[in-house]
Image (tube, rainbow, N blue to C red):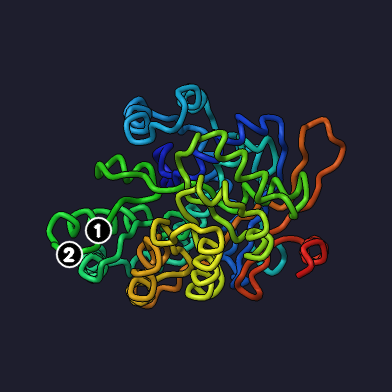
Amino acid sequence: MRQIITHFTDDDLYKFTMCCAVIENYPRTMVRYEFNDRDDTVYPPGFAALVEEQVAMLENLSITEEEVAFMRRKCAYIPSWFMRYLRGFRYDRRWVKVSQDSSLRLHISFEGNWSDTILLEVKVLAIVSELYYMVTGEDSRFDYGSYYSRSYEKGTRLIEGGCVYSDMGTRRRASFEAQDTVVRAMRDCQKDISGPGRFVGTSNVYFAMKYDLTPIGTMAHEFIGAIAGMYGPLMANHIAMSVWSRTYRGALGTYLYDTYGWRIFSLNFSEDFANLFKGLRIDSGDNKEQLDMIIEKYRSLNIDPRTKQIIFSNALDVDRALDLQRYAADKCCPSFGIGTHFTNDFPGIRPRNIVIKLVAVKITESWPFYSMTCKLSEDHGKHSGDPATVRRFLETLHL
């Protein structure tokens, strides 16, 4: 079977920025990740073996000098030593375990040094998603000509509606070609259409390079979740914000706050952090309710929320983004990260509802045990992690 991931930077920027922060601050930390199919999909027989084959193919990837030069030019906040690290980075199939149980459900786990395994998540999710459509034959229904037209129309509506937006659809894309089609359509639309909105880039570093766009991203929940596993959830946000600001010295200043809910984050979000970070990302809960709490918090700190960027990234489509733009335009500087709606929106095709989450961590390899961790979503029913760990974190946070 053909190799699905053929470029080292066919990955989301936040995996690289987090990897850099992990090496600088937690170089010996060990972690475990686990795959979760929220739809409890029954996969075709032999699917696990095909995933293993694709993971093994990752071992032939290495970053090119073209990719290094692009990241140096567009990501000046990343230190030069990290580029040297990436030149020597190689994937290792031994970090990954894949199987199917007797009911053909899929199980995937990663284990190893955090700075190694952190670069697997997005690529493996993209593999599982595209491979599923290949094996089931659903990819024969992908009409990329009409997909370009529909993507261009989405971009037109967003630009004319005043939305500042980016593509964030690598993880659950229908295919590499689907994301390529979307980014090309959005790039062309930005050149052709006049309006108050704009397409600002993509989270995918390779496509940003291919179309000379800005790669977009900062961090994911795993960064805060791993810190919570090591040091507890009460101060995880405080530690994460301190570490992140020290690593990037004010750059990459959009913080993802919802790993353990608004309440504990708000208690950790002091005036110095509120001034230091340029904004926040809303990734769960009711978007308008979350925004209103953020606005109230900024005002309580005597900060004008209209000077702060709020990125919405929670299950957005064009209609939701336009509605939120109208609601938020006079309250903050809104922008939108749109994922699956861009890269997996073919008629009659159901997007994969899959995630890979960091579930266990130990501070160094010398520790004899892992500490479990979890994510507590603002969306009811979307907590991820071992149920006992979820209950323990909920009790610790008085939720």
Q: Residue furthest right?
A: 368
What amino acid is found at the position of numbered circle 2 in the picture?
Gly
Q: Under tag 1, what secondary structure?
A: strand
The residue closer to the viewer here, 335 or 184, is 335
- Residue 57, position as x, y percentages in the image: 50, 39
What amino acid is found at the position of numbered circle 1 in the picture?
Arg
Residue identifier under label 2: 195
Res. 30 mark: none
Residue at image coords 15%, 54%: 191
CA separation in Å, label 1 and label 2:
8 Å
- On the question of residue 116 being in view, the answer is yes
- On the question of residue 335 being in view, the answer is no
Above or below, 112 against 189 in this view is above
Are discs 1 and 2 less than 8 Å apart at CB?
Answer: yes
- Residue 359, position as x, y percentages in the image: 71, 53
Above or below, 74 against 107 in this view is above
Res. 198 mark: 1
Q: Would you call the spot at circle 2 few (<14 residues within 10 Å), some (14-19), or many (20 or more)?
A: some
Residue at image coords 84%, 35%: 367
Residue at image coords 77%, 44%: 230
Q: Would you call the spot at circle 1 few (<14 residues within 10 Å), some (14-19), or many (20 or more)?
A: many
Q: Under tag 2, what secondary structure?
A: loop
When asked about the image quadrant of residue 137, the answer is bottom left
- Residue 10, position as x, y percentages in the image: 41, 43
Residue at image coords 56%, 63%: 300
Q: Quadrant of the C terminus?
A: bottom right
